[in-house]
Image (cartoon, grey):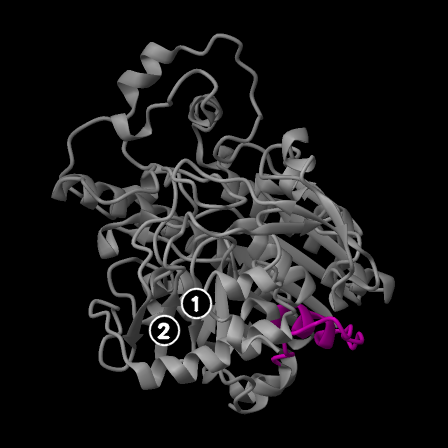
């Protein structure tokens, strides 16, 4: 068996033609949907980027115990499980967070890997004295760095080295993937994990993709929204959305080249192709830009998943309504190669769903460390928040005390204590470290952009009557049922006591 697993970052589900989008040119995602089984009710689990990837690697939620961080010594990565079973695994990615402190243990789980440099504020091109005055004149004030140490300076330096389309990261990432396929397409028993940081911001695409989306905007470069409330003009909103559209169309184009490659060499007969993302992105919907800070509306949490398998060509073009999550990808990838699924895995293999639609869970839990705890049953979404986001205590449970870009500070570690293991830690005790707090006094592990969580009000949405989540409401009967499901899932994931206390659910802890 051979598998190609393609993961984009911030791939907005409803922007894709195969999910009903009609304003962005994505013919190749549509073309793949005609060969694949498309999952209509697929959700993320832990957010944002690296927590989502830890879910992906381990097949279990991690946001109840940990913020952004690396794989832990007790974590069982799908790639390492495959490798130990004799499956060759190769990672090609320009997702530079893998090479920061908070992601540094993921890529080494593969048999081999290739890192494409230059995305966002990857510390790629060196410039001791960047021309800040020239940069400030080139870019919209939203994108101006807050001082010389701001990562946006590095991003501007990197971008100066991307003049031709071949210099951009997405084309280089796919080229490296094709290099692997050229060398290995006649071999058996391998998995290629091809991962693109795009269409993550900044939304920088070559002119030939951008020209499809005129916005009428006249001004300096505006393609990188901050995570904040929308305060932009209609022209600025149009420009940012147009730049996202251009970048997504570039992703579609290069994904189409992969489909062409599979056609050319008839790989469909013996190679599975899996396509998904980590999360979506708000482009001024709900009056917000970005992710992390606001409630996790479906634009962020409801994500695409498509799978084509040579044994299920008769199901090509079909759709599935079963409620699935990112944690299901790990056991699915193992199952594709006949590798046993570890007992610590909470997700479900999706191979049976390729044959026919069938329920695999009643509800799905998703969220971000320190933010709301959210649940959906496919009909309703329920965002549950503490009454006071600042008057709660959270702890990081870890043996790898690393944040996004730094190690835990010694001041944080002075409050650490060694605590007994959880069931998923394979008998290994853990450090229990008080979570650091953001500028609003809210406990969180991820400092993020903009100063903390907002709109932290417990609400329900009925996706049947209100699919755009514009009409929040409360209903005691529905909430009681969803809270019971939430508590059940928290118990199954061994949520610590404070995870219940902050949500006023201590009485539901078993």
The residue under label 2 is 381
Q: Quadrant of residue 439?
A: top left
Q: In this view, does 331 lie above or below 74?
A: below
Is residue 348 one of those drawn in magenta?
yes
**C-alpha span from label 1 to label 2:** 7 Å
Magenta residues (range): 328-350
Q: In this view, does 231 lie to the left or right of 346?
A: left
Residue 103 location, x and y as percent?
65, 43
Q: Mark 2, residues whose alpha carbon is within 10 Å: few (<14), some, or many (≥20)?
A: many
Q: Mark 1 points at which residue?
A: 374
Total label count? 2
- The C terminus lies in which quarter of the figure? bottom right
Residue plotted at (75% across, 52% down): 183
How far across and how far down the image is residue 379, in percent? 35, 82
| Residue 118 forms part of the magenta stretch | no
Classed neighbour count for the residue bearing mark 1: other residues with Cα under 10 Å, few (<14), some (14–19), many (≥20): many
Q: Quadrant of residue 215?
A: top left
Residue 461 sits in quarter: bottom left
């Amino acid at each position: 068996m051979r598998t190609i697993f393609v993961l984009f970052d911030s791939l907005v589900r409803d922007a894709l033609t195969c999910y009903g989008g009609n304003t962005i040119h994505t013919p190749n995602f549509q073309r793949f949907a005609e060969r694949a089984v498309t999952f209509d009710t697929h959700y993320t689990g832990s957010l944002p980027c690296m927590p989502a990837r830890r879910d992906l690697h381990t097949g279990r939620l991690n946001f109840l115990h940990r913020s952004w961080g690396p794989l832990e010594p007790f974590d069982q990565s799908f790639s390492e499980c495959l490798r130990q079973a004799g499956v060759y695994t190769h990672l090609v990615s320009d997702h530079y967070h893998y090479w920061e402190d908070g992601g540094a243990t993921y890529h080494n789980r593969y048999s081999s890997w290739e890192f494409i440099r230059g995305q966002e504020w990857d510390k790629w091109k060196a410039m001791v004295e960047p021309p800040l005055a020239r940069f400030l004149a080139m870019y919209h004030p939203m994108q101006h760095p807050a001082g010389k140490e701001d990562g946006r300076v590095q991003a501007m330096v990197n971008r100066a080295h991307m003049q031709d389309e071949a210099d951009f990261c997405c084309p280089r990432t796919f080229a490296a993937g094709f290099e692997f396929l050229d060398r290995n397409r006649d071999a058996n028993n391998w998995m290629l994990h091809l991962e693109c940081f795009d269409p993550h911001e900044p939304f920088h695409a070559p002119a030939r993709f951008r020209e499809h989306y005129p916005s009428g905007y006249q001004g300096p470069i505006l393609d990188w929204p901050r995570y904040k409330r929308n305060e932009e003009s209609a022209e600025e909103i149009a420009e940012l959305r147009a730049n996202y559209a251009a970048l997504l169309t570039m992703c579609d184009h290069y994904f189409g080249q992969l489909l062409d490659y599979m056609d050319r060499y008839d790989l469909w007969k013996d190679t599975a192709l899996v396509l998904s993302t980590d999360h979506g992105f708000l482009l001024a919907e709900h009056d917000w830009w970005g992710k992390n800070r606001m409630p996790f509306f479906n634009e962020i949490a409801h994500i695409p998943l498509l799978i084509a398998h040579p044994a299920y060509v008769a199901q090509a073009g079909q759709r599935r309504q079963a409620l699935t999550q990112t944690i299901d990808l790990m056991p699915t990838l193992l199952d594709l190669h006949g590798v046993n699924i570890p007992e610590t895995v909470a997700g479900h293999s999706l191979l049976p769903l390729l044959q026919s639609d069938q329920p695999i869970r009643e509800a799905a839990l998703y969220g971000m460390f320190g933010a709301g705890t959210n649940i959906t049953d496919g009909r309703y979404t329920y965002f549950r928040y503490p009454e006071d986001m600042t008057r709660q205590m959270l702890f990081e449970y870890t043996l790898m005390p690393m944040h996004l870009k730094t190690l835990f500070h010694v001041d944080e570690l002075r409050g650490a204590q060694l605590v007994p293991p959880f069931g998923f830690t394979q008998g290994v005790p853990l450090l229990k470290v008080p979570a650091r707090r953001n500028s609003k006094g809210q406990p969180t592990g991820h400092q993020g952009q903009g100063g903390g969580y907002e709109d932290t009000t417990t609400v329900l949405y009925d996706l049947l009557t209100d699919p755009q989540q514009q009409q929040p409401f409360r209903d005691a009967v529905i909430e009681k049922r969803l809270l019971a499901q939430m508590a059940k899932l928290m118990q199954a994931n061994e949520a610590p006591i404070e995870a219940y206390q902050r949500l006023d659910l201590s009485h539901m802890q078993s």
